[in-house]
Image: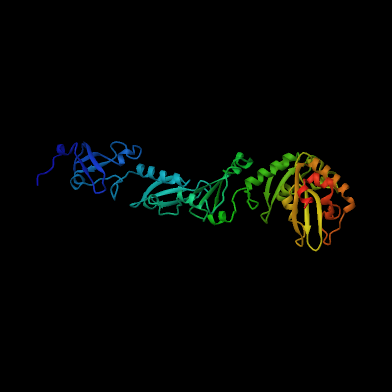
């Protein structure tokens, strides 16, 4: 058989078993086996991945009508080309490419979860062929009939090398709140599909959201600012119960448990006798947001309670378990406005005062018979027309 000369190869084209066409463009001047720069009818269209000069074959591949690009079963790619392929795959899964390297003869890729910052290495072949724990974006549309996300959420698959939280929920509301603005949150929340199917959301829209210590610090600072306290910091106790250190407006340097301070409005004990009275009035918090509520209690006896709280969720959890609670209405105003309304309504309803069979904090002055639901002042204040007319 006549030996093929290099000059006879230039400009020639051939079709491989994969159906792509290889065209010989120029010879590479080097010793040894002749090599050529070629173009592939498919791969060369991707100029980022295969710029001119990146696809090279030797004379043997020419004779056997083979190639070295992605049309081959064994493509010969540089680390840079492999990196580009990995980044494209990971963009789809909201994961971050960190590095690519060889260990012995095996190529590995380091991938980071952008939320948890966890990093894990995957074999390049497994990542490219999506044989790792990746979920496809097409799967999200399939889930729309099963999970009601609503307009405030977006769902993204993600590589999570440790836990089963293989999805990221982006909450539009939480991504624009004070925690995201302060840098203590990204607006992206790791979650699992089984939790979403049960309408258990991982963001701050859920009552079960667990705030990080940085977010608790922010909440503590805000609580101090509202009460004109000087925030000194947080400290951890032996029982993992954080305390907040502060200086009150009267100059007392104190520390209080963080959650009661932030959630229940507990403040400096040395000032308590001067600052608070039995009616629940807080003169140093008159501009803070407060809640006036009307709650129906049902158990062995039935009655209503008119009260106020800076944190109704915490307040409701302290009532006796023997009662079923139904919040009929809530009004959110400043503490001064809420307190004034509460005192006025207590005075209006004093003729219907009721003493529950099971006593609890607030039961002495704030409980009334259900007759008050038909009182014009209660109906207009709490907008109970529909309830009252049933």
Query: Residue 382: horizontal and vertical position, in percent?
Result: 78, 46
Q: Residue at x 57, y 44 (%)?
A: 151
Query: Residue 21: horizontal and vertical position, in percent?
Result: 24, 42
Quick one: 168 or 369, which is closer to the camera?
Answer: 369
Picture colour scheme: rainbow
Q: What number of labels is visible? A: 0
Residue 318 location, quadrant: bottom right
Residue 251 can be seen, yes or no: no
Residue furthest to the bottom in view is 300
Residue 214 vertical position relative to residue 28 in the rendered view, above or below: below
Query: Residue 82: horizontal and vertical position, in percent?
Result: 36, 45
Q: Is residue 174 left or right of residue 11?
A: right
Residue furthest to the right in view is 351
Residue 217 vertical position relative to residue 324 in the rendered view, above or below: above
Query: Residue 255: horizontal and vertical position, in percent?
Result: 74, 47
Q: Is residue 148 left or right of residue 67?
A: right
Residue furthest to the left in view is 1
Q: Residue at x 11, y 44 (%)?
A: 3
Residue 154 can be seen, yes or no: yes
Q: Residue at x 87, y 54 (%)?
A: 353
Q: Is residue 33 left or right of residue 312?
A: left
Quick one: 110 or 84, which is closer to the camera?
Answer: 84
């Amino acid at each position: 058989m006549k030996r093929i000369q290099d000059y006879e190869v230039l400009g020639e084209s051939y079709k491989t078993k994969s159906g792509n066409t290889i065209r010989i463009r120029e010879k590479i001047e080097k010793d040894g086996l002749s090599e050529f720069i070629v173009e592939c009818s498919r791969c060369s269209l991707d100029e980022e991945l295969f710029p001119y000069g990146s696809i090279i074959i030797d004379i043997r591949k020419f004779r056997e009508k083979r190639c070295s690009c992605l049309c081959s079963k064994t493509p010969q790619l540089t680390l840079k080309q492999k990196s580009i392929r990995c980044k494209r795959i990971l963009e789809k899964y909201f994961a971050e490419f960190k590095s690519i390297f060889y260990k012995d003869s095996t190529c590995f890729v380091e991938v980071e979860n952008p939320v948890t910052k966890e990093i894990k290495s995957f074999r390049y072949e497994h990542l490219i062929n999506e044989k790792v724990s990746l979920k496809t974006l097409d799967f999200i549309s399939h889930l729309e009939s099963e999970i009601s996300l609503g307009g405030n959420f977006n769902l993204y698959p993600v590589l999570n090398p440790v836990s089963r939280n293989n999805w990221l929920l982006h909450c539009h509301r939480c991504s624009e709140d004070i925690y995201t603005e302060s840098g203590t949150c990204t607006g992206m929340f790791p979650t699992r599909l089984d939790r979403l199917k049960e309408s258990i959301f991982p963001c701050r829209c859920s009552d079960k959201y667990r705030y990080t210590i940085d977010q608790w610090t922010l909440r503590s600072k805000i609580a101090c600012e509202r009460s004109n306290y000087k925030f000194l910091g947080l400290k951890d106790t032996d029982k993992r119960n954080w305390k907040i250190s502060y200086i009150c407006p009267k100059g007392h340097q104190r520390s209080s448990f963080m959650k009661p301070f932030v959630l229940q409005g507990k403040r400096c004990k040395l000032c308590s006798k001067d600052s608070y009275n039995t009616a629940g009035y807080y003169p140093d918090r008159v501009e803070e947001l407060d809640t006036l509520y009307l709650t129906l209690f049902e158990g062995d006896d039935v009655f209503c309670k008119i009260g106020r709280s800076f944190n109704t969720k915490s307040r409701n959890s302290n009532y006796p378990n023997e009662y079923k609670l139904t919040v009929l209405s809530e009004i959110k105003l400043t503490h001064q406005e809420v307190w004034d309304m509460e005192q006025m309504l207590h005075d209006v309803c004093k003729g219907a005062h009721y003493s529950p069979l099971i006593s609890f904090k607030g039961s002495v002055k704030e409980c009334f018979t259900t007759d008050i639901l038909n009182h014009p002042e209660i109906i207009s204040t709490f907008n109970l027309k529909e309830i009252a007319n049933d």
